[in-house]
């Protein structure tokens, strides 16, 4: 459970914090002001119907932490002191006063109800539809002892106890106080407070606030660089805080990347400012090797286009490091021997981990330099070093991929049986020039009598797949046994990239596995799918990446090995061909589902998909072109009653019609997604009918209820963003 202060969730809100003002000591409570700071759960899909209040004095010190549920008959309703937090000697007296307040001031409890509804609406992206809260005044609350907590709720309370309260003041807040005063360092503190959450946990509210901050403040780049340098130079380094700051940096890069993709004004300048500032402040002026390596890793993970200024700064740093270490005076063979030993000393268990460590150090370097170094590594005595070097055919830079494949084709006599297997697994992932080199490398290795290591036996696997979302991204989680526990092989596909990411998540205990499965259901609309659908979609992703001159991340080779997959190859997705296949199957198995009555019902029901199904939560258009169309309508219509409806029609005609092909592909892929599941959230044939309607260019999108709803959601996204601005 992720708890956030109401004032942080809604920084534009200017309601005063409820404050208890004591002009003299009462009981053990010293005189002074005590603010009741409301914290709410921001987990998507949660409806816990409660709040936690931190009572702070004028020095921002916690004096009581109170938990209260909004349903009086519930066993956990309270109010009670949350004993997972340190309570002051007079916390019980503050609790008694709080109980008097909510019993006497009905507006106070109504405000808590309203704030809860506000939070759920913002988190879920749609109006809160939970059952009505009991009417204040129809019951009386009493302070109670903290209950004996069952195991499941124990975790909730621990999460509440972990919530940070930095920079939350019990005073009336003006609009944007939180963002404009707190700055980047406070965001970093909030990331640190949530450090125990996994890379999959939802941070959308905090990311929304971070986005607003960096778009409103030109100082964000300098603030970020200064924060990282200060954390690095601290007398006692805190790795957790550094990692939290790096995670925040990754989100900043992701925010700016999306702004660039959507053509937002000023997005290119912001990205340039950030990269230039980090290049100067981190790589040149600071120069700490570990921080620079960690920064390089973040840049590689983000997959943003790196500017030359970063490459130049990294090269300058490496030259200075070599000079300070006296490496320029050493014979080349001694330098290489030291490099190979340092690689082995990294303690990585596999060539994949070894390569990840190497890329942190080298990936921003000159491509020719990297290729030459990996050529030397291919001749090393260490099998680990050679195997890691061979994986560089999946380097993120195309020049390095081609160069390494050429080196392998020229001499593959020293490759290992495992590298032989990986070359065979991946050959169909590449463009023709690299594939030709890989084939030559395999042929030469066979002539040198290198055996091919067998693929591991296919394991019993359960495939979970998310829908293709509004950003045209789709995730897969494949759960397979691993000793006494499990692992999840994760793959992310995205339009315009192909295979955008792949990695392996250890799930050593049953509890971690169950938590992971719960997270997927709550956050990503995952459904249990099939291995055939996974194979099909990865082949689509490989084809798109190859067409764009991109290669999948090297971890995909590890995923392929774990799943026993050597048949993945680039296969271009053809929406009309896939729809024809679904139609043929329905004709044979359920022809009644192709009847006109079924088609009309599917079109009619689609009007509610965005409201009723999580798979359509993000189905809307949101970019600079949409902004321009809507702004033009509002300028002409000004304050006329039909302005918003006119904007909806303009979005359909000027945006969705132009992007008909993209929506056809999204709907066709989601029809295949539904078809792959034994328990789909929607019958496949309904999505099929929508896809066929969009495929028919003579069928106006304005006559398709789903597309009208998408236009309405697009307008809503625009208006919401304008309110924040």
Image (cartoon, helix red, strand yellow):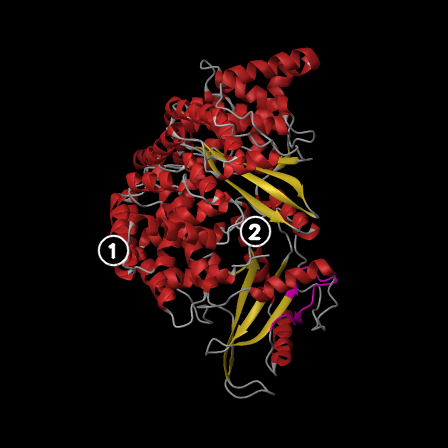
How many marks the image carries: the answer is: 2
Location of the N terminus (image quadrant): bottom right
Residue 574: horizontal and vertical position, in percent?
49, 18
> Can you say whether 324 is above or below 94 in the image?
above
Q: Which residue is mark 1?
A: 329
* Left or right of 292, for residue 114: right
Quadrant of res 567: top right
Between marks 2 and 1 in the image, the one whose residue lies nearer the viewer: 1
- Residue 307 counted in the magenta span: no
Quadrant of res 11: bottom left
Closer to the camera in the image, 346 or 30: 346
Q: Which residue is mark 2?
A: 120
Residue 417 in view of the camera: yes
Rounded to the nearest angstrom, the CA distance separating label 2 from label 1 is 64 Å
State which region is magenta.
68-85
Residue at 64%, 56% in the rendered image = 49
């Amino acid at each position: 459970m992720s708890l956030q202060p109401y004032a942080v969730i809604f920084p534009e809100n200017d309601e005063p914090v409820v404050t208890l003002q004591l002009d003299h000591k009462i009981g053990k409570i010293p005189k002074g002001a005590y603010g009741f700071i409301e914290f709410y759960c921001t987990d998507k899909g949660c409806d816990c119907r409660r709040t936690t209040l931190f009572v702070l004095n004028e020095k921002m010190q916690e004096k009581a932490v109170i938990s209260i549920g909004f349903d009086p008959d519930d066993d956990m309703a309270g109010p009670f002191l949350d004993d997972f937090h340190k309570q002051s000697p007079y916390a019980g007296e503050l609790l008694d006063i709080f109980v008097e307040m909510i019993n006497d001031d009905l507006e106070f409890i109504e405000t808590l109800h309203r704030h809860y509804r506000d939070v759920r609406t913002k988190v879920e992206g749609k109006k809160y539809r939970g059952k009505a809260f009991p009417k204040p005044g129809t019951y009386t609350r009493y302070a109670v002892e903290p209950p004996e907590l069952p195991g499941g709720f124990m975790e909730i309370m621990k999460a509440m106890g972990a919530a940070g309260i930095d920079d939350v003041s019990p005073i009336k807040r003006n609009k944007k106080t939180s963002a404009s005063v707190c700055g980047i360092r406070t965001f970093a503190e909030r990331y640190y407070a949530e450090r125990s959450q996994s890379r999959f946990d939802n941070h959308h509210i905090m990311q929304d606030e971070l986005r607003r901050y960096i778009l409103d403040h030109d100082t964000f780049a300098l603030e970020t660089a200064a924060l990282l340098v200060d954390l690095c130079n601290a007398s006692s380094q805190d790795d957790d805080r550094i990692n939290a700051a790096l995670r925040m940096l990754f989100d900043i890069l992701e925010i700016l990347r999306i702004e660039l993709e959507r053509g937002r004004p000023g997005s290119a300048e912001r990205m340039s400012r950030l990269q230039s500032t980090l290049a100067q402040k981190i790589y040149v002026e600071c120069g700490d090797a570990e921080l620079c390596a960690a920064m390089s890793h973040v840049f590689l993970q983000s997959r943003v286009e790196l500017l030359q200024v970063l490459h130049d700064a990294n090269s300058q740093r490496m030259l200075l490091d070599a000079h300070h270490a006296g490496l320029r005076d050493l014979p080349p063979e001694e330098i290489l021997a030291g490099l190979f030993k340092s690689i082995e000393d990294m303690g990585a268990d596999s060539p994949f981990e070894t390569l990840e460590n190497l890329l942190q150090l080298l990936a921003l370097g000159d491509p020719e330099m990297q290729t030459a170094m990996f050529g030397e590594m291919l001749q090393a005595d260490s099998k680990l070093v050679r195997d890691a070097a061979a994986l560089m055919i999946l380097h993120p830079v195309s020049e390095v991929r081609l160069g390494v494949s050429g080196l392998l084709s020229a001499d593959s006599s020293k490759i290992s049986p495992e590298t032989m297997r990986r070359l065979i697994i991946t050959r169909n992932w590449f463009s023709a020039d690299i594939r030709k080199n890989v084939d030559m490398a395999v042929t030469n290795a066979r002539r040198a009598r290198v055996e091919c290591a067998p693929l591991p036996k296919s394991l019993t696997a359960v495939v979970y797949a998310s829908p293709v979302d509004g950003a045209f991204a789709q995730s897969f989680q494949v759960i397979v046994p691993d000793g006494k526990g499990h692992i999840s092989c994760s793959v992310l596909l995205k339009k315009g990239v192909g295979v955008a990411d792949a990695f392996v998540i250890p799930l050593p205990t049953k509890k971690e596995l169950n938590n992971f499965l719960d997270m997927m259901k709550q956050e990503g609309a995952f459904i249990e799918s099939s291995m055939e659908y996974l194979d099909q979609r990865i082949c689509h992703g490989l084809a798109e990446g190859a067409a764009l001159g991109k290669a999948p991340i090297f971890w995909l080779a590890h995923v392929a090995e774990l799943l026993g997959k050597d048949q993945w190859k680039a296969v271009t997705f053809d929406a009309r061909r896939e729809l024809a296949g679904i139609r043929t199957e329905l004709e044979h198995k359920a022809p009644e589902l192709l009847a006109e009555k079924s088609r009309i019902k599917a079109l009619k029901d689609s009007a509610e998909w965005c409201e009723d199904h999580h798979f359509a939560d993000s189905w809307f258009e949101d970019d600079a072109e949409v902004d321009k169309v809507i702004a033009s309508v509002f300028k002409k219509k000004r304050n006329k009653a039909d302005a918003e409806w006119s904007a909806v029609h303009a979005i359909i005609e000027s945006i969705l019609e132009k992007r008909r092909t993209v929506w056809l592909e999204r709907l066709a892929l989601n029809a295949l997604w539904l078809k792959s599941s034994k328990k789909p959230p929607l019958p496949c044939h309904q999505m099929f009918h929508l896809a066929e309607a969009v495929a028919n260019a003579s069928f106006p999108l304005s006559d398709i209820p789903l597309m009208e709803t998408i236009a309405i959601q697009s307008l809503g996204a625009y208006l919401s963003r304008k309110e924040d601005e």
